[in-house]
Image (cartoon, grey):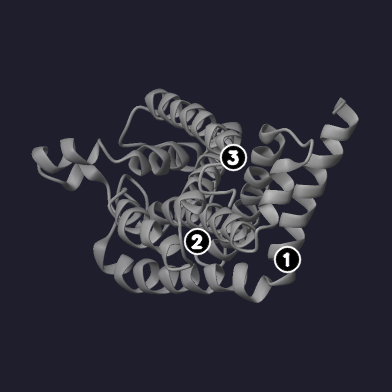
Amino acid sequence: MNRHEQFMAFATILVKEVRRFFRIWPQTLVPPAITVALYYVIFGSLIGSRIGPMGGFDYMQFVVPGLIMMAVITNSYANVVSSFFGAKFQHSIEELLVSPTPEWIILLGYTMGGVARGVCVGVIVTLLSLAFTSLEVVHPWLTVLVVFATSVLFSMAGLVNAVYANSFDDISIVPTFVLTPLTYLGGVFYSIELLPPFWRALSQANPILHMVNAFRHGVLGVSDVDVGFALAMIALFIVALWCFSLHLLKSGKRLRQ
């Protein structure tokens, strides 16, 4: 395929993915907004007023970046895992794999579809947060970079989950037993400076902690971790998942029957 044909193949996959989640927007865009709005009301307005300042900010301001990242992570992941497994279940992915379309174009198309949904939900959640608190983005480019890179990372993680899943029940195992606990323990609702030394050190092994804090640094200018290390870690995970996802698509394992 020449470059024009590659671009058309990529654009076709991306447009299909975007149209898919916009077509079922009551399932893909509204629920995250309602869930996070409830978090804002309960943890920010009601409980936050009793907790007081954290990290030099009102508690509501402190948790907003974490809640935005939580929405971006879960929706980027959910978009790709559900869409790709649906294509695998219907055997339509086999037709795409035997076509002249390069595997990296397929991977890029699905990944950018997940990024599109993650960013859309992130924007919705951010606009909702303005009804509860004020936000002044200290480092705009860092904020955009972290959101984009994190969306890419979890979109590819969703594709890996979809490849290995054997049923629709399997695509909920990782989000339920891995993603959700790591997110809640990733400094969304608290600063790890409040933890005892042992648990603070253990929390450093949670990659989502670094992503949340890198984003919080971009928005508020404060972080519990080294931002440079967090960006390097995200980049390393992206490269590793890109290579592994590409290997799965090229081998056709668990995809061709």
Q: Amino acid at mark 3?
A: Phe
User: Could you tell me which secondary element the residue under label 3 belongs to?
Assistant: helix
Q: Which residue is mark 3?
A: 148
Q: Residue at x 65, y 63 (%)?
A: 90
**Residue at the spot of label 1:** 22
Q: Is residue 15 left or right of residue 232?
A: right
Q: Amino acid at mark 2?
A: Thr
Mark pair 1, 2: CA separation: 28 Å
Q: Nearer the viewer, residue 121 or 152?
A: 152
Choose mark 1 or mark 3, whichever is in front: 1
Task: Give coordinates of residue 49: x percent, y percent.
Answer: 31, 68
**197 relative to 18, above or below:** above
Quadrant of image for the N terminus: top right
Above or below residue 130? Residue 135 is above
Q: Measuring 74% from the left and 70% from the top, which residue is drawn there?
A: 23
- Of residues 124 and 74, which is closer to you in this image? 74
> Please, what secondary structure does the residue beneath circle 2 have?
loop
Tell me where residue 87 appears, x and y as whole percent.
Answer: 64, 58
Q: Based on the displayed image, in which of its 4 quarters is residue 2 positioned?
A: top right
**Element under label 1?**
helix
